Image: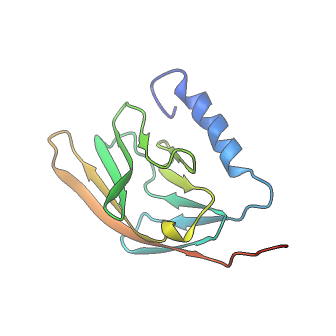
């Protein structure tokens, strides 16, 4: 199960399918489990960032982009997602999705994990580069 709460798994699963099955959108996948991973996404498309295999055993975590927490959470609580309208997160498989990519999404993403004493247990980064051109039709 994604969460211990009964309502969250189905709601999150429905949101996952709605956000990832838009017609015509390009989806790229990136394995960000290694420090320093280089990830690429198409402008206007979707990128899935595999951050970990599973977040269920992590006491506290946060993902920062440009020194802003874009994702944070604690064990057995729903995650806090800053870009709610354009992203989704599945703790059980460690995947963070960013939809409708813009050039502003490019940059360094830093994942930090902490144990129950507040001690940092992991710190790694990945680079996301959003590529593409805008097409204007008149």
- Residue at x 44%, y 57% (from the top left corner): 51
- Residue at x 35%, y 65% (from the top left corner): 66
Q: Closest to the observer: 101 or 20? A: 101
Residue 7 percent location from the top left of the image: 55, 22
Residue 115 lies in what quarter of the image?
Answer: top left
Residue that protrudes farthest toward the right in the picture: 138
Please tell me whether residue 38 is drawn above or below residue 23 in the rendered image: below
Residue 76 percent location from the top left of the image: 37, 31
Total marks shown come to 0
Please tell me whether residue 63 is drawn above or below residue 90 in the rendered image: below
Q: State left or right for residue 53 relative to residue 98.
A: left
Q: Closest to the observer: 80 or 3? A: 80
Residue 86 percent location from the top left of the image: 57, 51
Residue 75 percent location from the top left of the image: 33, 35
Q: Closest to the observer: 57 or 106? A: 106
Residue that protrudes farthest toward the top in the picture: 6
- Residue at x 29%, y 43% (from the top left corner): 60
Residue 77 lies in what quarter of the image?
Answer: top left
């Amino acid at each position: 199960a994604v969460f211990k709460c009964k309502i969250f798994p189905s709601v999150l699963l429905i949101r996952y399918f709605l956000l990832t099955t838009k017609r015509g959108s390009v989806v790229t996948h990136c394995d960000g489990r290694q420090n320093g991973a280089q990830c690429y996404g198409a402008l206007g498309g979707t990128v899935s960032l595999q951050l970990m295999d599973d977040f269920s055993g992590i006491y506290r975590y946060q993902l920062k982009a440009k020194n802003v927490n874009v994702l944070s959470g604690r064990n057995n609580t729903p995650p806090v997602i800053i870009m709610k309208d354009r992203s989704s997160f599945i703790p059980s498989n460690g995947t963070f999705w960013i939809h409708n990519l813009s050039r502003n999404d490019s940059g360094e993403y830093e994942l930090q994990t902490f144990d129950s004493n507040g001690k940092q247990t992991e710190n790694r980064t990945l680079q996301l580069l959003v590529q593409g051109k805008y097409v204007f039709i008149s």
